[in-house]
Image (spheres, rainbow, N blue to C red):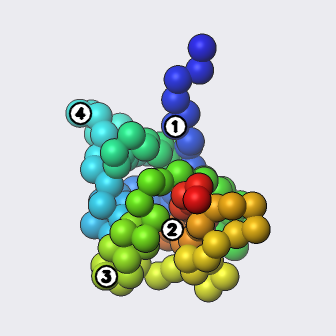
Amino acid sequence: MLTAIHPKLPMRDKVVTRDYYINKLGFQEFGSADFDGYLMVQKDRIQIHFFEFKELDPKENYGQVYIRTDAIEQLYQSLLDNKVPIHPNGHLALKPWGQKEFSLLDPDNNLLTFGQTL
């Protein structure tokens, strides 16, 4: 049976990616080994893995992750308080499909959408 999923997204610079996810989004580094060209972060029950892709053109990156939460308002406000830029078309809104969502782009243009069922 399937029990979890850990998406793997591209990153150009491990230091920049680590800083963004840990210091801006509140994730923690996962694992005890510092793998060359690979990064794992976690927050609550969510893990995201990153692989090094130095030649990545962020304008051509279509990496996307949808993350469900049970505290969308608090999460959104905490990111605003931490001055994390929200996607220009992704501010917190109730969607016609019954989700309250918002989105942001990481330093490599990976789209992170957070959603809560209402």
Q: Which residue is mark 4?
A: 32
Can you say which quadrant of the picture contains the N terminus?
Answer: top right
Marks 1 and 3, the one that precedes in the sequence = 1
Alpha carbon separation for disc pair 1 and 3: 27 Å
The residue mark sitting in front, 1 or 3, is 3
Q: What secondary structure is marked by label 1?
A: loop
The reply to whether residue 110 is visible in this rendering is: no
What is the number of the mark on residue 77?
none
Alpha carbon separation for disc pair 2 and 1: 17 Å
Q: Quick check: marks 2 and 4 in contact, CB under 8 Å?
A: no
Alpha carbon separation for disc pair 2 and 3: 17 Å
What is the number of the mark on residue 106?
2
Alpha carbon separation for disc pair 1 and 4: 17 Å
Q: What secondary structure is marked by label 2?
A: loop
Q: Quadrant of residue 78?
A: bottom left
Q: Quick check: marks 4 and 3 in contact, CB under 8 Å?
A: no
Residue at x-position 30% and y-position 61%: 26
Amino acid type indicated by mark 4: Ser
Q: Find residue 35 and report its horizontal and vertical position in percent.
A: 35, 37
Amino acid type indicated by mark 1: His
Amino acid type indicated by mark 2: Asp
Q: Which residue is mark 1?
A: 6
Q: What secondary structure is marked by label 4?
A: loop
Residue nearest the viewer, comparing 32 with 69: 69
Q: Quick check: marks 1 and 3 in contact, CB under 8 Å?
A: no
Q: Which residue is mark 3?
A: 81
Q: What secondary structure is marked by label 3?
A: helix
